[in-house]
Image (cartoon, grey):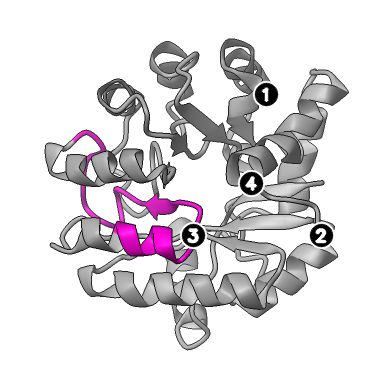
Amino acid sequence: MIIDAHVHTFPENIAEKALHRLESISGLTRVTDGTAAGTAAYMKKMKIDKFINLNIATAPGQQHTINTVAAENNKKYPDMISLGSVHPENPEAVDELRRIKELSLKGIKLHPDYQDFFIDEERLYPIYEACSELELPIVFHAGWDCYSPDVIHAVPAASAKVAADFPKLKMVLAHFGGLRLWDDVETFLTGLENVYFDTAMAATYMQDPGIAMRIINKHPIENIFMGSDCPWEAPDRSAAFVESLPISDDRKEKILGQNAALFYGISEA
């Protein structure tokens, strides 16, 4: 089973506008139309068995609707596992986390750049504490982002501080722990048991696969997932990056799908 652990979709009424804006900021070209239906069809074409859809509440008032739609999409698209989101500025964020648990969503996505916070700010700690208690993993954008190129909101040292302050919190730090900050990822984050990485955008930005090998060899292999960041990187390209690494077939199979299946409780059915 191949699982793409890092995918984004957008509501149909704003998908085209949102993708056009993000293309202009990033200089990247989309590979899907960004909708849930279009992405689900695309994943079948790419022979991706399941995918984790990462929703982001980019404004405080969005969180309730985003989580309701995520639960609806999980019923509508059997190969999609949509996560929820909360916004740090919404005073009901912690209560919403309890509703996310009741909706059977398997975790949340937070984006420090889009939601304007630094990962180790203590105003986020009530959210981290609640996610620890509710056993809700948090997927974070980590490292550089074209949306905020001059300010990095989740550097590896700060992410490591959160991991130490909340040892029961499962943290998925996207982009191999910190996009374009991989030397610091190796220094501060490798070996931490409650920290997980995905490979999103590695095929696009990680020019030297030796960097990936240094991180993989110092981190629990079960804590690494294949991810694409679709619609910005094609999942077959992301999978090919993993396949190209000089590691055993057993380790490749874990990264390509087994680890995410175990982490999110995904069956092949």
Which of the two marks, 2 or 1, is nearer to us in this view?
2
Image marks 3 and 1: residues in contact by CB distance under 8 Å: no
- The numbered disc on residue 105 is 3
Left or right: where does residue 92 sit relative to residue 241?
left
Q: Is residue 14 above or below residue 201?
A: below
Horizontal side of 122 relative to 175 (left or right) equals left
- 3D distance between C-alphas at marks 3 and 1: 34 Å
Q: Amino acid at mark 4?
A: Gly
Rendered image: mark on residue 98: none
Which residue does the image show at 74% across and 37% down from the upper left? 258
Give the vertical position of 144 relative to 46 (above or below).
above
Label 3 or label 1, whichever comes before in sequence order: 3
Describe the element under mark 1 as helix, strand or loop.
helix
Q: Which residue is mark 4?
A: 265
- Label 2 vs label 4, nearer the camera: 4
Structural distance between the alpha carbons of marks 2 and 1: 23 Å
Q: Are marks 4 and 3 in contact (CB under 8 Å)?
A: no
Of callouts 4 and 1, the N-terminal one: 1
First-in-chain label (2 vs 4)? 2
Circles 2 and 4 in contact, beta carbons < 8 Å: no
Q: Nearer the viewer, mark 2 or mark 3?
A: 3
Mark 4 vs 3, N-terminal side? 3
| Cα distance between the residues tagged 2 and 4 | 22 Å
Residue 46: give its label: 2
**As shown in the figure, which amino acid type bears the numbered disc 3?**
Leu
